[in-house]
Amino acid sequence: MQKTIAIIGGGPAGLMAAEVIGAHDVKVDVYDSMPSLGRKFLMAGKSGLNVTHSEPIERFVSRYGKRRAQIEPMLKQFGPDQLRQWARDLGIETFVGTSGRVFPVGMKASPLLRAWLKRLNDSGVTFHLRHKWKGFLTPELALAAVRVASLWDPGGENRDMIGLKFETLDGEQEVKADAVVVALGGGSWARLGSDGAWIPALKQAGAQVEPLRPSNCGFDVNWSLYFRERFEGHPIKPVVLSFDSFHQQGEFIVTKEGVEGSLIYAASSLLRDEIDAKGSAVMMLDLAPDRSHEWLVERLSRSRGSRSMASHLEKSVNIKGVKAGLLREFVSKEDFSHLQPLAHYIKNLPIPLIAARPLDEAISSAGGVRFESLDDRAWTFARLVVFNQRIFVGITAQNCIDIFHAAEISTDRNILDSTLMYVRRLRFIPRTSILLPRNASLRTREINIHIRAFEFLNLFIHVITLSVNLHTLMDYCHNPCSVFSQ
């Protein structure tokens, strides 16, 4: 019997999962709540679809900060060069812009998405639109329990499947699949489909989930009324933004609420974390990145005659418009009138940020399923826990939650022995680590399996996520565990 995979979410993550899984002999169904697929992807392409960056790979992976160790191995397998080749295979050529960013020729997302969806349709992937996921049919058992018989006969008609609930135009519908990939994105731009509503269902299913927070976002600044009305929408360029370990040249714009733009987005995670920890953050701007402090002092020291200070700034050091406005906004009148302090602030202007913009306005989201719940391949992590006489394997991943089968231990000693033999064959637990007293007192109809205190359980199970070998789940165990009967 052909296995079925349900992919929840029709954005780039879900579509890529469908493409990779669809290359195997399985039936792939993609469910999305919106009337069409890839809506946020299309929105990202309105002002030019930046698909990746051409910078050296060392610099590229360094941008992932403290998560570099988890992300770098994946980028080595599928990085910027592979992504450009993937687009080329779809008939979409790319080019490197002056900033080093990579764009499709034509700049738009729609031609790439159309070609991608056509290839998926041709491969047999089925799309179900206006299907909003409402959770698992049995949330308390959402990590999936199947009978031991299913392990012996994984292709049999009696194998248990994972039940899903969807809200559709025709009412609530139920769907069952052998495995589920949850690719529902973050919580920004909720009107385009990714609203973060999946979090309660996955938490209830046992996933470790961090709250969603804005990423690649703007920040609030307490502008004066004059500055806000005079300079809203003005670009500030070129400048160098410094904060903590971040030091980069670029540009951003003044908004009614504060600041946003590519340079702000690049530093946003550091700034957001500082605000979360301390209630505010102060970024430093160099308004004259190509000039030294000494050069500024020398130029500003020249006689200005009858010119105003604003005119002198413009004529002598080319500080004018919004840059001059920033100096007036954050430099005291006394310092503004003295050359040394003024030159210092041109090179080191503090801009206090009071809050990140709301999640719904952000380009992307931080948070979600925790990396700590993943294995060393950053794909899946499985944890063995005991619940109502059942052993469950809970499997989570950052943007892709694979829910597979585990075994229900029940009936008598023969069933248990057979299960342990099956487990050993998969190299799940070494034979010598199974400690089951032969004189154990066993109930007639059921056996309770207890795992000694959870902190002693370090059971790591590899799952080859996209191999679709759904029932050969258990690969190895770092530390042996002891199993006792009650």
Image (tube, helix red, strand yellow):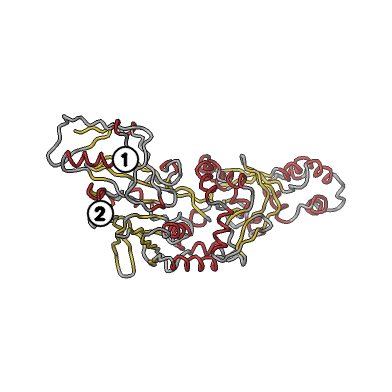
In the rendered image of this protein, does residue 81 appear above or below residue 42?
Answer: above
Judging by the rendered image, the residue that carries numbered circle 2 is: 159
Ranked by sequence position, the earlier of labels 1 and 2 is 2
Answer above or below: position of 41 versus 296.
below
In the image as oriented, which residue stretches furthest toward the left?
444
- Near mark 1 (Cα within 10 A), the count class, few <14, some 14-19 or many ≥20, is some
Where disc 1 sits, the SS reads: strand
Q: Is residue 312 left or right of residue 327?
A: right
Q: Quadrant of residue 236?
A: bottom right
Residue 106 versus residue 483: which sits nearer the camera? 483
Q: What residue type is disc 1 on?
A: Leu
Mark 2, Cα crowd under 10 Å, few <14 / some 14-19 / many 20+, is some
Residue 307: assigned label: none
> How far apart are the two marked residues, 1 and 2, measured between alpha carbons?
21 Å
The residue identified by callout 1 is 384
* Quadrant assignment for the N terminus: bottom left
Q: Nearer the viewer, residue 438 or 216?
A: 438
Look at 71% across and 52% down and name the residue there. 238
Q: Position of residue 141 (x, y in %)?
A: 27, 49
- Give the residue at the far front of this rendering: 425
Residue at 77% x, 44% y: name it.
337
Mark in front: 1 vs 2: 2
* Coordinates of residue 212 in the picture (x, y in percent): 45, 50
Q: Are marks 1 and 2 in contact (CB under 8 Å)?
A: no
| Residue 366 percent coordinates (x, y) | 49, 49
Q: Quadrant of the C terminus?
A: top left
Q: Amino acid at mark 2?
A: Arg
Left or right: 378 as drawn, with respect to 106: left
Element class at badge 2: loop
In the rendering, at what x and y percent does residue 395 appear?
Answer: 36, 46
Figure check: 38 above or below 364: below
